[in-house]
Image (cartoon, rainbow, N blue to C red):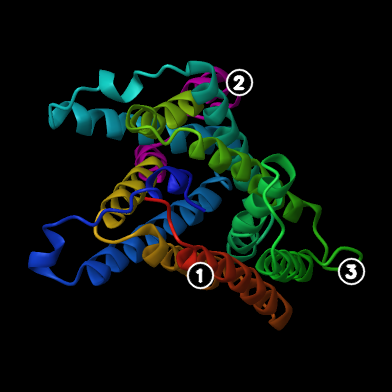
């Protein structure tokens, strides 16, 4: 699940230029699919690097190089960086950044032991968690599609985790924890819908992660070789590029039309797991993935049909 999906998914106005080039939906979908494959590659590379470096150092690279590349891009494009960090709700923005850090750290620790495809599928239980928290916290009404989505998604997670069976690995609970934490991250993103706050949210969240992990990483530091530096930088680079393509993709078409393509990340992660780590999913895992994706699709398709206020 992309950590800034909540921020960019609110963009509902297609870019006018898209109509003059290629069909907007095709352009947006192509960018979204490319983005989620890059993000799956980021997680796959991160999983590989945890075999060489401590997971804290890999998480540090994920945030540090991401924010460094974004800041460098803003400087080269002569954008006003101050407009991206100016906020009237600094504590709220910082807490949101800490939730992102917690979710990312839990996911990467989980990847040290569990298959990439399984962890990514469980992470995409997130839309169902958002529904659950919206009902409990925001007191939204329970509808039939809520029940169907929650039951299907929870069943998929249980099939993958298989508690009580010999295949059960407690590390699978970490992506599930990450899904719940990131659900809170997305709910907080909804509260930052103002243009200024949303712009700041794009930069503040990874900046908070970079600062916090930079304080901890000296205790776990292992000096990388040149290849190691390039690989660590690539983790942050893939994240920054993936999020950049997501932002661009959501300018070409509405979020309701493009959001289903985000689930291609589950497919990408499964393929990377097979070819890079020899992680062959069994029929139970594939069934669980299908149920989680179906539950998210139910939510997205129902949301697309709901009338939007003018």
Q: Main secondary structure of the magenta part?
A: helix
Name the front one of labels 3 and 2.
3
Q: Is residue 93 above or below residue 46?
A: above
Name the front one of labels 3 and 1.
1
Q: Which residue is mark 1?
A: 301
Q: Earlier in the sequence, mark 2 or mark 1?
A: 2
Q: Earlier in the sequence, mark 3 or mark 2?
A: 3
Would you say residue 53 is visible in this rendering? no
Location of residue 294 in the rendering, given as x and y in whole percent from the top left corner: 60, 74
Q: Earlier in the sequence, mark 3 or mark 1?
A: 3
Quarter holding residue 186 = top right
Location of residue 171 in the rendering, given as x and y in whole percent from the top left corner: 75, 51
What is the number of the mark on residue 165? 3
Marks 2 and 1 in Cβ contact (< 8 Å): no
> What separation in Å lies between label 3 and label 2 (alpha carbons)?
37 Å
Residue 219 on the magenta segment = yes
Q: Which residue is mark 2?
A: 219
Q: Residue at x 13, y 32 (%)?
A: 77
Quarter holding residue 195 = top left
Label 1, secondary structure: give it: helix
Badge 1 local density, few (<14 within 10 Å), some, or many (20+)? some
Q: Nearer the viewer, residue 175 or 309?
A: 309
Q: Residue at x 57, y 65 (%)?
A: 299
């Amino acid at each position: 699940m992309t950590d800034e999906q909540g921020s960019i998914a609110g963009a509902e106005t297609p870019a006018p230029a898209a109509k003059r080039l290629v069909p907007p939906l095709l352009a947006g979908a192509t960018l979204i699919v490319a983005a989620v494959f890059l993000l799956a590659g980021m997680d796959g590379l991160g999983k590989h690097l945890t075999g060489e470096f401590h997971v804290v150092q890999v998480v540090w690279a994920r945030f540090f190089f991401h924010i460094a590349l974004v800041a460098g891009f803003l400087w080269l494009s002569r954008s006003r960086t101050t407009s991206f960090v100016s906020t009237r709700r600094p504590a709220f923005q910082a807490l949101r950044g800490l939730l992102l850090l917690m979710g990312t750290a839990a996911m990467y620790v989980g990847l040290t032991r569990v298959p990439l495809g399984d962890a990514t599928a469980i992470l995409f239980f997130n839309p169902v968690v958002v529904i659950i928290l919206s009902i409990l916290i925001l007191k939204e009404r329970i509808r039939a599609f809520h029940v169907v989505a929650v039951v299907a998604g929870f069943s998929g997670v249980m099939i993958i985790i298989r508690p009580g069976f010999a295949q059960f690995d407690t590390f699978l609970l970490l992506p599930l924890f990450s899904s719940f934490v990131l659900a809170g991250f997305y709910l907080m993103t909804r509260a930052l819908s103002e243009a200024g706050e949303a712009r700041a949210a794009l930069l503040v969240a990874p900046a908070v992660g970079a600062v916090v992990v930079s304080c901890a990483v000296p205790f776990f530091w292992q000096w990388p070789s040149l290849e190691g530096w390039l690989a660590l930088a690539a983790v942050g680079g893939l994240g920054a590029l993936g999020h950049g393509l997501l932002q661009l993709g959501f300018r070409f078409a509405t979020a309701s039309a493009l959001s289903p393509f985000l689930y291609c990340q589950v497919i990408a992660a499964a393929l990377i797991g097979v070819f890079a780590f020899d992680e062959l999913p069994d029929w139970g895992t594939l069934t669980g993935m299908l149920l989680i994706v179906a539950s998210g699709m139910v939510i997205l398709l129902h949301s697309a049909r709901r009338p939007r206020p003018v």
